Image (cartoon, rainbow, N blue to C red):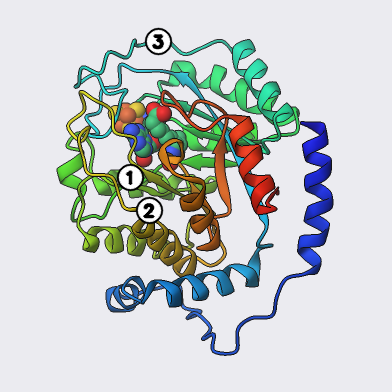
Amino acid sequence: MAVLIDKMSSASKKATQTIPAIPKDYTPHPTATTWTRADAEALFQMPFMDLLLKAQAIHRETFSPNEVQMSQLLSIKTGGCAEDCGYCNQSSHFDTGLKAEKLIEKDVVLAAAKQAKAGGAGRFCMGAAWREPKDRDMDSLCDMVSEVKAMGLETCMTLGMLSTEQAERLSSSGLDYYNHNIDTSPEDYGRVISTRTFEDRLHTLNLVRESGMKVCCGGIVGMGEQAEDRIGLLLALANLDPAPESVPINALVPVPGTPLGDSEPVHPIDFARIIATARIMMPKSYVRLSAGRETMSDEAQALCFMAGANSIFVGETLLTTDNPSETEDRALFERLGIVPE
Ligand code: SAM
Ligand code: DTB
Ligand code: SF4
């Protein structure tokens, strides 16, 4: 891995010296943070090549085109969740065969964080299958945050809804990012989840902002949604004020036993279209090519990077499902000349 990092950092130096000029026919994106549905639709419906070029040009205004941020996930509390999110392996409402576990010990978390760092991850994201954390777990959670942070990693948690006090405690313990997804458009939301509302999610996102943490918020595609819901998801994300610093776009990992387990997968070109539209609508955000890479071809992932994705989850497991191995990701990065950020 050390050899890989060395190679990657020299490639990075080269990459930053050779950023091509912005194409002559490129029109700057609006500076306003508010996107209208009509503008978002017009973007989303552009011919694919025009959309991709526009997204790549906008990407290069803020980011180095050959650098990708790497985050690693760990499930710190698996399964048995009270919520009924129709896509989720961990909901107690569905029989997926997943065994429920208690909150794991800090030492196990720190060992995983150490491994993640050695594998090149810059951020460690701890996820729990909870509707919300219990106050009695807050001391353990805050200890995990401060000790992972002390290892020189960025920290992220996703624990469900938070109270003001919980958000403030996590923030003062050194939590850099809080992940809380809106998952789909406001109009489609009720089809997917019944146990908490879209407004509940916005409320937690506001508390996260107010506590000073950075917001990681995105959604899932491939749940049987319509094109207008994909636009609605991106509109809702881009019109958060400010837009989330980190935007995970997940392709549904279909899990047998969940209500959405036999959804039709998204065509890779349609997936890249969603990424490109996200890049244009949220020009300063990290757009993460998140769940679903395990079944994506190298070509499909390359198209997503071309469309402006600049973050991935690394490591063989996401929370409970498979992700490409370090070896596969290393080969893909080398082939594309991509280096970790
Ligand atoms: N329980 C917390 C919550 O829902 O906020 C945190 C963990 S939850 C697993 C985090 C996110 O993972 C969900 O909001 C959803 O967007 C994503 N996710 C869960 N299952 C997924 C699946 N099968 N495919 C793709 N994304 C998924
Ligand atoms: C996000 O948007 N995707 C990650 C992370 N945030 C927590 C989770 C993906 C979970 C995929 C299904 C699983 O592994 O259980
Ligand atoms: Fe629970 Fe989160 Fe899964 Fe929903 S997505 S069932 S809240 S673990």
Q: Is residue 247 visible?
A: no
Q: What's the mark number on residue 117?
A: none
Q: Left or right: where does residue 148 sit relative to residue 318?
A: right
Amino acid at circle 3: Glu
The residue that appears at 50% across and 26% down in the rendered structure is 317
**Rendered view: 104 above or below 43:** above
The residue that appears at 70% across and 75% down in the rendered structure is 20
Which of pointers 3 and 1 lies earlier in the amino acid sequence? 3
Q: What's the mark number on residue 268?
A: 2
Q: What's the mark number on residue 201?
A: 1
Amino acid at circle 2: Pro
From mark 1 to mark 2, how far is it between C-alphas? Answer: 28 Å
Label 2 neighbour load within 10 Å: few <14, some 14-19, many 20+: some
Label 1 SS: helix
Residue 24 on image: x %, y %: 60, 89
The residue that label 3 is drawn on is 101
Label 1 neighbour load within 10 Å: few <14, some 14-19, many 20+: some
